[in-house]
Image: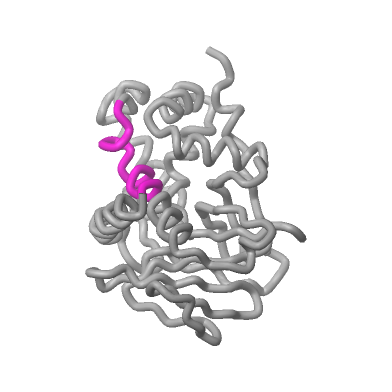
Amino acid sequence: MANERAAIESPLWINFEHMPVPPLRFFLQQEYKPTGVVESAGDGITVSHSPWFTEVAWEVKDLDLVALLYLLPMDDETMLLIACLEESVEPLFKLLSGPDFGDELTKLVALRWPEQYAMLMHSQSRTPGARLLCNITTPEQVQWVVADQLRGQAREEIHPGRVIDLVGASLETFLRMTNPGTELPGIVHVLGGPDRLTRRLNAVAGLLGGAGDVLGVFVGGVQVTELVSLAKSAYGVVTDLQKLRD
């Protein structure tokens, strides 16, 4: 089999580890406090500025929930609008990029999850303007993010449609990555059966400092199982909004 994983195994890293940049917060917040001066951008969106980044907070209607995004510089010409997924991508990515199952899993992800495959592929190839699934490194930790590249006038404007679309893509990615046994048809066969799937994903989660279970990992002090339920509710609201805008 060709080296399928070679297309996605080295995603973009954005490095702030030598600066006193605080860790990003998970993109779903039930209790949100801005970190800087707040201004309204309309449509339930507020913007707050700090020395290191700009927070973009969107109040999700019908839910006691705020979707939190960040604006960070990628280079002199490009800003990134990002949603932080914490470490939720890492257990599956370890298997995707590994020598044992990576090629078959990558092929499966490309077939079943073309959106997430494209984000990883564009992240590795640094495709200008593409949506990316990449890493942010701060002094305290490494976090996975879904990122949109903004250039030109787009760097100065927070468009509600873009916010909603990015939140929707981030919700889908989070829900898929935290439950591949259900969300990725064929993974059980690739990993050798349901028992081996569970053991292998849980072993990786344990290495990350979790509770020995992919859904036992804590994100910002909240167990992933709780966030999955919250994300499912938010995903329904966001997809309905996207349909209305189409």
- The count of marks equals 0
Question: Which of the two residues, 222 or 75, is positioned nearer the viewer here?
Answer: 75
Identify the residue at the far right of this view.
76
Q: Is residue 136 left or right of residue 76?
A: left
User: Dominant secondary structure of the magenta stretch?
Assistant: helix
- Taking the spot 49% from the left edge, 35% from the top edge, the residue there is 117
Q: Position of residue 189 (x, y in %)?
A: 31, 21
Q: Position of residue 64 (x, y in %)?
A: 26, 73
- Taking the spot 31% from the left edge, 24% from the top edge, the residue there is 186
Q: Magenta region: which residues?
A: 172-185
In the depicted structure, whether residue 46 falls above or below residue 123? below
Q: Position of residue 208 (x, y in %)?
A: 46, 51
Q: Is residue 227 left or right of residue 99?
A: left
Question: Which of the two residues, 91 or 154, is positioned nearer the viewer here?
Answer: 154
- Taking the spot 46% from the left edge, 54% from the top edge, the residue there is 87
Q: Position of residue 193 (x, y in %)?
A: 28, 24
Question: Which of the two residues, 77 or 199, is positioned nearer the viewer here?
Answer: 77
Name the image colouring: one colour
In the depicted structure, whether residue 211 falls above or below residue 124? below
Q: Quadrant of residue 124?
A: top right
- Taking the spot 67% from the left edge, 44% from the top edge, the residue there is 128
Does the magenta run of residues contain 243? no
Q: Quadrant of residue 33?
A: bottom left
Does the magenta run of residues contain 175? yes
Identify the residue at the far bottom of this view.
37
